[in-house]
Structure formats: C-alpha cells, structure tokens
Amino acid sequence: MMTHHASLTAGDPDRLRVTLAGHPFCAELDVGHVHAMANAASERQLPTGSFLLQRGHPADALALLLEGDVSLEVTEPGGDPIVLETLHGGDPVGWSWLFPPYRWLFDARCLTPVHLLQLDAAHLRGLIDTDPVFGLALTQRIGLLVVQRLQFTRAQLVEMTHHDRA
C-alpha cells in the first residue's frame, strides 16, 4: 500500500489475533482461519491526508480499518478528486489485491488519523490456494464488499440524476 509518513508495527501476535477476530470483516470466520490471517497482519497508523492506496499502484494488502475515516476517490488527469464513498472504522478497504493484475482501481485518502490492520495480499492468496474452505469464506466476503460498493455507487448515480432533473 502506498502511504506517506506511516508507522508500521508487527505487534504482539496474540493481540493481533484478538483485534482481527473482533473486526466485523472477520465475523463468523473459523478461529483457525482468523489465526492464519493474523500471520499476514500488521498494524499501521496513518496521518490525515496520506494515501492508504493509490490508483494504478500494486495492490499488495487488504486493509481493515480500526479507527478513522478514509475517502475512496477517483481523479482524472487535471481534475479534482471525486469522492465515491467515505469509509470508517470497522470497514474493509481494497479488493484489487484478489484479482489480476493486482493494481488499485481507486485512491483511498485518510480524512482523519487512521489506525488499521494490514493483511499481506500474497499471504492471503497463498491461503486461498491451499485452503478451499478459507478461500470460499474470504472470496464471499470480498464479493459482498464489491456488491455493497456497487449498490452505494448506483444509489449515488440515481440521486445525482434526480438532482440534475430538479
């Protein structure tokens, strides 16, 4: 993930497992799967204004927000950023790490100081390849995330269309 002035800590493995298990993204996941994911996890602190991820850069991690606010944005050359959605503590960020060519499709910028868990994408993909039950559980969660983001974007487009007609 691209960041500026980020601090990264490996953290205590037991505390990482507990924190990961308590994140909404991991709700109802098998304890063994949470422990396997924790082996790919590290904590990060990001300051306001820094980028958690940037469009076109390698998609190398799944981020699980613990605290703070992040805007998902698109910026066309020469244009201002367009905020697609604002994410908060408890939300996952990023699914491009799961699909080739493993490049971010959006920017994610910290609107406040952010505390998150970062899960290494190569490690997660390895777990998916070796454990089909884990792979299904994780891809179902990512699929739900994609559907939720598409529904949110659709609602925004409908609202914009109605607003333009008024």
Image (cartoon, rainbow, N blue to C red):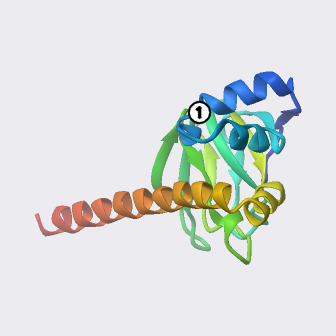
- Who's the residue at 72% across and 70% down the image? 103
Pointer 1 residue:
23
Res 88 visible: yes
Residue 74 position by quadrant: bottom right
Height in image: 26 above or below 79?
Answer: above
Height in image: 60 above or below 5?
Answer: below
- Who's the residue at 73% across and 61% down the image? 128
Return the residue nearer the eye: 60 or 122. 122
Return the residue nearer the eye: 72 or 26. 26
23 with respect to 50 (left or right): left
Residue 89 position by quadrant: top right
Return the residue nearer the eye: 158 or 93. 93
Neighbours of disc 1 within 10 Å: few (<14), some (14-19), many (20+): some
Picture coordinates of residue 82 (x, y %)?
A: 48, 60
166 with respect to 74 (left or right): left
Residue at far bottom of view: 101
- Who's the residue at 63% across and 47% down the image? 109
